[in-house]
Image (spheres, rainbow, N blue to C red):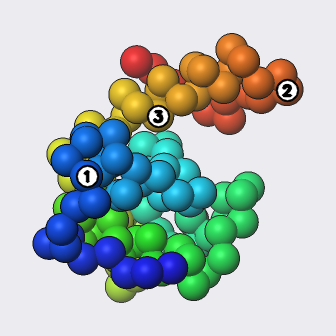
Amino acid sequence: MKRLNPSSPRRSPCPVSCTLDIVGDKWTLLIVRDLLHGKSRFKDFAGSPEKIPSNLLSERLERLTLRGIIEQCDSPDGTKHRAYRLTKKGQDLKTTLVALRDWGLRWEKGTRAMIKQTE
């Protein structure tokens, strides 16, 4: 996948287009979902049911960091391992994810929310 440069020119001024350029792939919003559910480390994201390949996970984490959606932080368990957390910009994606979850629950038979969310 082509690396995104945060300062590269946009293909369109449309906010939907610009947002999809950042989070519109198969994996990115699933990483944000996992962060919202309390996951914070590479191994946590890799262990999600969707089984994101490690090379893609590394690339998406780098992209999310460059875009200011996540940031690296100390691991919550106090180990030397780095962790990730959502920035304010990343936390603002919660509404979008809740809307996608609700749409999927309503219209896609056989789906279920893995974790109950409080709105």
Callout 1: few (<14), some (14-19), or many (20+) C-alpha neighbours within 10 Å? few
Q: Secondary structure at mark 3?
A: helix
Residue 39 shows in this picture: no
- Work out which residue is located at the far left of the displayed protein and give it: 7
How far apart in space, not on screen, are marks 2 and 1 (Cα)?
36 Å
Number of the label disc, if any, that sits on residue 2? none
Residue 80 point in image, percent of width and height? 36, 85
Q: Residue tagged by mark 3?
A: 97
62 to 24, vertically: above or below: below
First reached walking from the N terminus: tag 2 or tag 1: 1
How far apart in space, not on screen, are marks 2 and 3 (Cα)?
18 Å
Residue visible at 57% across and 65% down?
44
Residue visible at 22% across and 61% down?
10
Q: In the image shown, does 21 or 37 lie closer to the viewer? A: 21
The type of residue carrying mark 1 is Ser
How far apart in space, not on screen, are marks 3 and 1 (Cα)?
24 Å
Residue visible at 54% across and 51% down?
30
Callout 3: few (<14), some (14-19), or many (20+) C-alpha neighbours within 10 Å? some
The type of residue carrying mark 2 is Gly
Q: Residue tagged by mark 1?
A: 12
Q: Residue tagged by mark 2?
A: 110
Residue 82 shows in this picture: yes
Q: Nearer the viewer, mark 2 or mark 1?
A: 1
Residue 14 point in image, percent of width and height? 25, 42
